Amino acid sequence: MAETTTIEPDFDKILAGLDKKQDSKYLFKILTNIRKQVEWPKHKEQIASFRTKGYIKHVIRTLQMPQKHIIDVSLSILGNCVLDKGCARMAIGTYNILTSLGQLLERYPTENTINGRIFRILGNMCTHRDQWANTIVERKPEFVQHTVDLLNTVCEGEFSLENYSEATVTMAVRLLRLMRYSIMRVNSLGVLKVVGCLFAKLTSKWEETGAYANLLNNVIKILYEYTRFNTYHCISELKKSHEENPLMCLSKVVLLNPKCVVKIFLNCLEHSRLRSELPICEIFAMFNDKLLNYSKEELGVNYMIYIDCLCSLLDHPIPRSLEQWGSCVKTFVKVLETLKEPSRIELKCCNSIIRALTQCRYEERFVTEELECNIIPVLAGKLKWAMGVKDESESLAVSHKVDRKRGNPMMVRKLLGNREKPKRRFMNLERCNRSEFLDYTNIDSPIERMHTSQFPSPSSDDDCRPPWDRSPSPCSSNEGSTGSSALSPFGSPKPPTDYELESDSDDYSPVCSDADSSEFDYNDLPYYDEHVEFERQIQNEQHRTDKSSSENPLPDNLKVTLLYEICKLLDSFVKFQPPQLASQEVIYLLLKSALYFPNKFSYREAFADLINKILKCQSYVIPLLRTNIIEHLYDLTEYQHDKLCLKCLENKHFGNKILGCFTYVAESEVSKGEIAHALIRGDDEMKAQLVLVIPYVITDHSLLKQFLLECGGLRVLMNLFQQNDKYTDRSMRTLCSLAKERLEIPNPIDVETCGTTSGPSFHDGLPGKTTLSGRLVAFKLDDGEVVHTERDFLTSKSEFFAILLNGHFKESDEDEVNLHNVKGESLRCLLDLLQHDKLRWAILRRIRLEVLLDTATLADRYLLTDLCMYIIEWIEKKLMMPQTVAAIYRWSIESQLNLLRVESVAFAMVYKYGDNKRVNMLKQLFDLGYIEELAEDIYDLLARYVTMERFKIVKKVIVIPSIELDFEF
């Protein structure tokens, strides 16, 4: 007997102990230490070293020893090692482990621990892609037969686990599941019969006591795997396995593993001859009851799973019926109201629900029920959620950078020369996830006729760029796709993927103790379960959302799908004309959604088509005109940049297109009568809302005249302007639009006049200091300042001064004349303009606006009409601008001359650089305090142009020498 010594912890030294012949006690210690060092996947490198050094043969030889505890620990080592492909290949091909395992089963046919460990070894071998399942069935079919016999023993009479532990039975079921690649051979050995019987008895036990849930879950998995292939044979075998049809038990265990049970149900459905063979109504009722009667908080993570399962059932054409559809409408509307978190999981569920509701859009009673459940506000909430809209008062025209047209792409290609062009890869719809991408198999309405080539390609969670912004990427491989393809029928054979029930998570190897059957405790054997995996995804999404919901925007590919599905569903409601569809919120969100897509993108056209349908409904005309949607559209048509910006052009084109729809309907015969009646007989609120939008949509001049003058619309608009309330700003914008866009009132500074502003060309430089000669007169002002000028020159220029200085007044004999209410600077400016008749424009360009206005007042006061008009014309053409228009208007009223009064108002309303500046100028005029005078001026100006049957203003800009202005404001 070899001497017993303490084993070193080094793995190589431990393995070296197998090179020598050892007694059973010391050998057991060596094997126990080896087992601790070959846990999978923690010790992959040590397992590889164990294989390359050939020690696997020593462990297989120990299976011939009589000591059962040595056999147990050796089987545990082999169970871990065969998870490595090389070890499995060496164990089967080189050392013929199958023979050794077969001999063990002959020696210990009913031993619980040995059977369980052998089943585990065989199952781990079957996890590899080297088709070891076929090899095992061909060489050793007795393994399968032994497994079936063991399960038959367990199922005899009342189900009990007296002879075999739950872990051993679980390993047996797992082995049969992993042999699905040899299903034709395995089925001939009666596997499905025993599995069906086991399923029925486990279901009864679980219903009574709640026991064996893990084992039952594993049986459900094997049913799913086997019903995927040769489904009709599976159904017939299962029905023979027990006096009660095991398939009818699916409704009893549906809440244990919902996703897997639903897949079994759908796999069997296509090959079932009678609907009574499957619990269709019971499964629908189960999910419907849970979702309708329990809250999201009560169901937890199961809430999302039940939604996904119910949508999968309705997505399949066979199980659904009108009754199932009708029973789910109220449930889906309730669920949509509940889903409010910005997470990927909830977004997928929303897509599935809305797609399911869209499928019944041709059944009027279901559409009516959806409307009765108030679904339109719920869908509007989803649009608001997807687009990130917080307030409907936000502008449709999102601020953007200047996007100018690029160069000729053919020229760019020519410059690139013979460089290799990038290969574009298109998405394979058969390998796409049904829950993420649109299904183009049911395109049957005009709104659904989209180009599949424009469909967004899959993207990762981290890539949140819009689909049209991403570079073409190859479609996902089999390992990244789901188990059920988008276009292939349920139940058809498909290669297993990472999302299927098999996974390397099955490759788990527990550490056993000496002949301790607890090593197979099922709770320590994790396997891939779609239920568990879906729960993990939901928890990850919730954690990510709770961590930072604002920093994780919705994935754009799912957002696109959600927008499209909502568009299709809302399109089915148009013919019923529900009042909620014409609400400001819904139309605004539809416009916002349409603008989310690039120009000429098919989805934008779909939303535009839906909006067009809504606008064409006659019953919606007045409700829509009472909203501020039209003003949002008008804002969209305004340029943020110049006309070379492509984004501005796209927005303008889209806004004009929708406004054209409003115009078409509003100018129809029926709408004209309704609008006129509302303006005459409607309440004050209705009149106010209508007059604020009429100038935007009515293009016919005679109709505009009828609404504004004959029906009193313009007077209502002016009353809103004067009230200084919530409608004041909107009324200003409307007035500016009416003057600029509809009446096309010309800008005063662009209108050709008969004045003399241009004057002769100036060549002699600016006027210098004037030398006075002859008899002088001094004007003494109120502030004591004295201004001298030549008496004869002044009397020759002004009739007023001629009478004053040469008439019968006392001033005619005085050399110093008192002038009251006159400023010295203004008087000197007046005298300079008189003395330098041909150089007036050169003098005026140096004078401040305030002085020029006062000078114009003096010119009128002293009867210098020509000079006064010259100054007024100069101010109008050269000094009227947004910064000065308020000062000019105030002077016009306060001086009581009324010169430039209407021109100031017209300039403020038709200034060419944007509505915002025009409204700001009107506000400046409004803030002067002369509100009644301003309202009267605006009304007279607009009424005059409205009454003009034909008007055509020839615009001509007067050219004045381009000299930098140095006046002060």
Image (cartoon, rainbow, N blue to C red):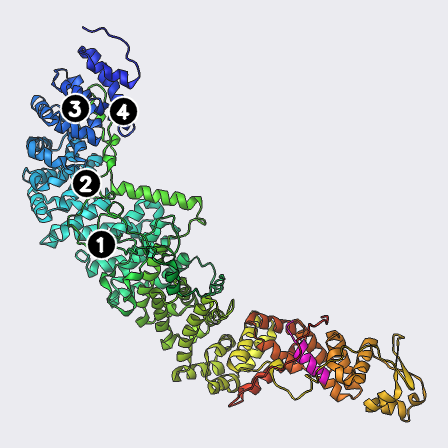
Q: Is residue 773 left or right of residue 116?
A: right
Query: How far across and how far down the image is residue 18, in percent?
Result: 20, 15
Could you tell me how far apart the alpha carbons at marks 3 and 2 are, in whole angstroms? Answer: 23 Å
Task: Using the image, determine if residue 673 lies above or below residue 651.
Answer: below
Disc 4: CA contacts within 10 A as few (<14), some (14-19) or many (>=20): some
Q: Amino acid at mark 4?
A: Gln
Residue topped by disc 2: 221
Residue topped by disc 4: 46
Nearest to N terminus: mark 4 or mark 2: 4
Q: Magenta stretch: give its range.
A: 870-882
Residue topped by disc 3: 113
Query: How far across and how far down the image is residue 272, in percent?
Result: 10, 52
Q: Amino acid at mark 1?
A: Glu
Could you tell me how far apart the alpha carbons at marks 1 and 3 are, in whole angstroms? Answer: 45 Å
Of tags 3 and 4, the one toward the viewer is 4
User: What element does badge 1 sit on?
Assistant: helix
Q: Amino acid at mark 2?
A: Lys
Q: Is residue 622 left or right of residue 850?
A: left
User: What element does badge 3 sit on?
Assistant: helix
Query: Toward the viewer: 559 or 314?
Result: 559
Q: Are marks 4 and 1 in contact (CB under 8 Å)?
A: no
Residue topped by disc 1: 430
